[in-house]
Image: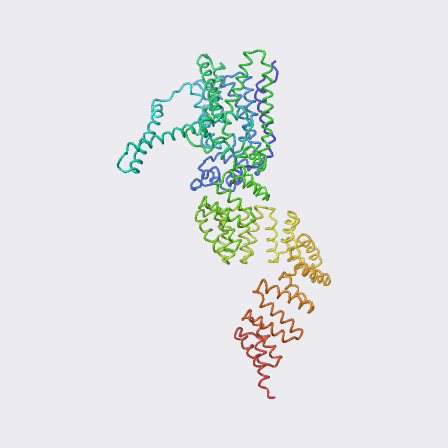
Amino acid sequence: MEPFWRSPVAMFAVPCVLAVVCYMNGLPGEFLHDDVYAIEMNRDVKGEGHLSQLVQNDFWGRSMRDARSHKSYRPLTVLSFRLDFLLSSGDPRWFHAVNIALHACVTALVVFVSMRVLKAAPTVSVMAAAHFAVHPIHTEAVSELFLDPSGYLNLGPSIANRDYQPNGLIGAPPAINIIISLTQPLSGAVCRNVLCPESHKSANVSSLRVSLCLCDISPGPFLNIFLSTLPVFVIFCICVHLYLQTCSMNGSTNHLRCFISCLQSVLQLLVLCVLLSTLMFMYLPALNLWLLVCPVTLSYDWSMGSVPLVTQIEDPRNIWTGLWYFVLLILARRSFQTKATANHKSDPGFVLVMSLLLLCVPFIPASNLFFKVGFVVAERVLYLPSIGFSLLVAQGLALLCGRVAGLKLPLTLTFLMLLLVLGARTVYRNQDWISRGSLFRSGVRTFPQNAKMHYNLANLLKDEGNKEEAEVHYRQAIRLNPEHPSYHLNLGTILANQSEAESCYQVALRLHPGHAGALINMASLWIDSGRLAAAIPLLNKALDIDPDHIEGLLVYGRALQLRGELQRAGHILQRATKIRPDWTRAHFCFANILQQMGDLEGALQEYMKVLDLDPRESVAMSNAARILVSLGNHGEAEPLLRRAMGVQPSCWDCLSVLATIYSNRSQFDQAVVTLGQASTLAPNETSIALKYVQALRQARQTDKAHQALQKLVSRVPQDLTVLIFAYNYSMEEGRLGDASQYIRDAVLVAEQTSRASLGRLYFEQAEVYRHFQDYDTALQYYQKSIREDQHHTEAIVNTGSIFYLKKNYGQAESYYLRALTLDPGHSQARQNLAKLRGLMTTPG
């Protein structure tokens, strides 16, 4: 009986267990990078849309008819994500577990394909699968959830098709042959069109079939003729263009000489550019192969300067490029020579040929050879090529062990050590994919010269409230790439100095005049600085560029709100809630405007929508409770406030509203205790201090109320609201001396800061002097009040009364008549005038 480790079960189980163990520590990872948009924010995935929308929308949840659609159409992938979301309630750990399981399945397929299709030795198959399972180049494909490896499960039936004969799969039962024959075309079509998460992956899987038939199919004559004549045709077009351009620029003479001179300089430049471009183009596959050989430098993004351009022929990287291609050509030549002499597929030469094809052909769609794919290096595209690389490593070790008997043990130990090192690197790399912070910081560590890495980290730090460190990384991104408008734009959003922020927005608009975000941020800055009239045109321009820009709609609504156009502001904000029904801020702003318009029921509904989206939004709870108190619904308001304080124990505003409930219930002692707690949490909040004084008075703790008021006035002696409150409080308590002092202080403050309230304050000061029977001073302040507000009827009537007391009946009558002109129904003016005229007509 053979040992267990040589049994078929062990051959499949060991690599699969290695695949699971190496990626197990990635389970706690969050939704990162594109996962947020493809899964977490995708309404089709979350089940918020009808199932029929899956066939109408793209991979990211946007309608295929929308001009902004990505046009990536994979409804079955989205359906699988939707099922995962339903089963897990959106828990990213479930998605990670599914990806790890799929990676283990692909690892098992590597064993199957190696042994059953390529006829490799069992030891070679297991070694290749183990090497594939632990290789750290797969961390992006496995850890980034929207890169679901399920498309690679088509690998088995795709490759198995090579051994499918009219009599069936070699060595397989008839039932298996029937299933493969029926499902292989369907699985291939599904993989190419809907299952694979990225277009280049579907091309990878499809290209496997090409690679497996390369030895038997040669290019047609038409393709050869086309490829050979294409460069000649391009050069001919360039020459014709140059000649016509020269004729148009140099008049009617010396056309040929000018043309030849121009052509020489252009061709020299063209040759140099083509040479450097070719060297760079050839370097990229070599770099990808180096990542398979030595996966030390790994990054979630290789764009924008991560790979420096080859700008000189003397660049030492060109030597490495040539060396790589030389080795590759030698391997290919030896492999094909071996295959040509092989009599059966179990020969190692056949395995080497197929390994090279698996390494090279699946990479072609991602090589930018036939079409641009949007990236120069991406670790995820090496998922399939790494199978060929792992087979090369395993087959090479097997050949060495077979030819040199003494090397078997050292090479075996070396391979085990290699697996250990690769596995450790994978486990370590998984930690980078746990959170946004760890991922973006790893990018900065790997490529500190990449502006985008600093920009992404700065955005994260800004979201976390760490503006100082965010500013450092924004400025570093600008130093590395000063021509990117978004870098200047986001730097401006965190600068406290408005002039510096405005300068950043101006630079962003200079670089990109149609940047809607820069226009909106500039408008928001101008609104904050009081330049409302100048901000409106910017907002109109931004919304013309992007009518559905959610931030622009919110800022526009705020601008209209400040202009007093509440109805229009409400319509704008309501539209924002329809565009982004899942965004709490849109509902919050709409609720705020409805509350200001007096639509308390509508505002309450919007605040409840905010709480449905974010049950921990304490400000929405507080505002909703305030509305419930206004509507007299104390029973629902109190538990809502306690819930808010459970989320945010330091919510002094919640305590303030709760104290209002106690006061309305005549529970004044509880109101005092609650407001005392609020004052402790917000010692500088004057509104809480004023409510506390009022609560003490209602609880008949007048001495404490008086002391608290004096303490407040001494703390903020220039606060007009506090002084007016203290005056009214003192008048109600009959403390005329205190009231006189408070109103004098209030008048002095208002004369410096708020002349709009002077009319009323002069009137109140006159009232105090009238109580002291200082009629002359009272008359002066009544007249000052009238000068500030000529329609102040009470001041006019009281001025008439002072003249009446001073027996100046003519002046008294004129003031009474003036008051009645402003308010014909003023009863006090009528009574005083009637009394005056009765006195004037009485003889003696």
Quarter in which the C terminus is drawn: bottom right
Side of 260 where 5 appears, left or right: right
Front-most of residues 190 and 597: 597
Left or right side of 266 for 318? right
* Residue at (63, 76) in percent of width and height: 776
* Quarter of the figure with residue 55: top left
In the rendered image, residue 297, in percent from the top left (x then y), is placed at: 55, 29
Q: Nearer the viewer, residue 272 or 178?
A: 272
* Residue 447 percent location from the top left of the image: 54, 33
* Residue 686 image-quadrant placement: bottom right
**Which residue is the extreme one toward the left?**
252
Relative image position of residue 824 (x, y in whole percent): 53, 75
Observer able to see residue 664: no
Q: Is residue 509 left or right of residue 675?
A: left
Q: How many marks?
A: 0
Q: Is residue 38 above or below residue 569?
A: above
